[in-house]
Amino acid sequence: MRIREIAEGWQGRPTFAVIDLDALATNVQTLKKHVGPDVRMTVVVKANGYGHGAVPVSETALANGATGVAVATVDEGAQLRKSGINAPILVMGPMGAAERDRAVGMGMSIVVSDVGFAKGLASVVRMHQRKEPINVHLKIDTGMRRFGVAADEVVEVARALQGIPELRLEGLMTHLACADEQDTSSAHRQVEIFDACAAELQAAGIDIPIHHVCNSAATVQFPQYHKQMVRPGLAMYGVRPAPHIPLPGEPGVMKQVLTVHSMVSRITPLQPGDRVGYGGTWEATAETRAALVPIGYADGYSRSLSNAGWMTIGDRRAEVIGRVCMDQTILHLPEGLPAETRQKVVIIGNGTDETPNAPDLHDLAAVGNTIPHEFMTTMAPRLPKLYVRNGKVVAVADIEGYRRI
């Protein structure tokens, strides 16, 4: 059964996303098998689970082999705690002083890179009268130049952190800037710097139990760098870290979790010379037909796909003509298809025979000169998301919020 047919009973907006929780579960299981039983797997669910929904993604991942989740902000962690996620939550991004109270109060693990911030955390821990110290992970800047302590200051900062009884130095981490590039020499060099820092810490008598450096690209490609924990993000959602990097497991086992669907809402005959859309950027050269689809850049369908992207109607490729509007997009109706509304449209496919000829996220990224992450994370709340398990819709997230069915 094709994904689109699962949602036949949906009575809401005709344009919607489908989040295949069974595919997500399989992806997590496959990644866990790839890293092995002795490696912890903290899955990255920042940016609302890469646009898929942080709560259902976290629940599914934790039920299928993940040992914790990672977010970018305290607000994201708070959302998970309030939704009943009790697993370890690692806040990876910088946070302001005003956010420390919630992070500590909700028992999140926190990435640190300087002593001043760590002392501020300790004061909050004392204020909460916690009996146990809060876990912190020391991040080293090995070349990303974004966030982290300089390599030559690691021992000094780690020794200071160990001297703060309210904190437990649980992790040592870095982030790889170029693990998804064809030339991986930069990634290997970053790991060399990280390992050198780890050796210095060990020589100084500073024991940090969990080391982690691997994002999705490194998790897939470099098992020698798995260490005690990995942090897959994009791969968990069934998207290759780069077009040249295959996902683990047998071909087809891991697949893209997200697909987006709609229907034709209007057919317009076009005569030679007729122009389409804002600015009239597409002109008909012969008698043809235009099909209107109710999705636009306000839903996350990027304006960069104007006159360049495509969808499928009845499994036939239908090119985007004219500029993508805020709420609607116009397609060239393929020859041979009837001039009828309510024909099924696949806006984003998953690269399998469930959505033949439809663009997957890598296709859209190539056309839009961006990365799959951007299409995933810019899906608007008004685009309904139907969560499917065992062939049934089990939850919906839309502009009114998330609700189980």
Image: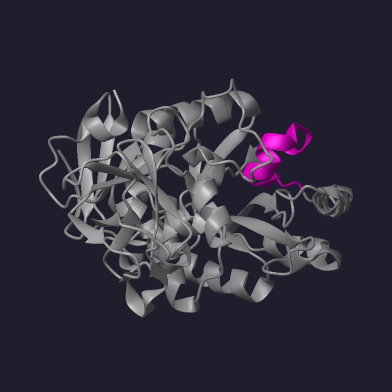
Q: What colouring style does the render use? A: one colour
State whether residue 65 appears in this view: no
Furthest toward the top, the residue is: 250
Q: Where is residue 269, by image quadrant?
A: bottom left
Q: Where is residue 353, by image quadrant?
A: top left
Q: Is residue 158 left or right of residue 396?
A: right
Nearer to us in this view, 151 or 349: 349
Q: Which residues are magenta?
A: 207-228
Residue drawn at x 41%, y 40% as measured from the top left:
349
Nearer to us in this view, 292 or 7: 292
Q: Is residue 342 left or right of residue 159?
A: left
Nearer to us in this view, 165 or 231: 231
Residue 245, percent across and down? 67, 38
Is 229 in the magenta? no
Relative to 56, is 204 above or below? below
Residue 185, percent across and down? 86, 50
Residue 282, percent across and down? 41, 68
Q: Is residue 247 left or right of residue 197?
A: left
Relative to 318, is 139 above or below? below
Image quarter (top left, top right, bottom left or bottom right) of the C terminus? top left
Nearer to us in this view, 291 or 46: 291
Residue 21, percent across and down? 35, 33
Is 217 in the magenta? yes
Residue drawn at x 37%, y 39% as measured from the top left:
316
Q: Is residue 254 left or right of residue 162?
A: left
How many marks on residues?
Answer: 0
Residue drawn at x 86%, y 66% as measured from the top left:
152
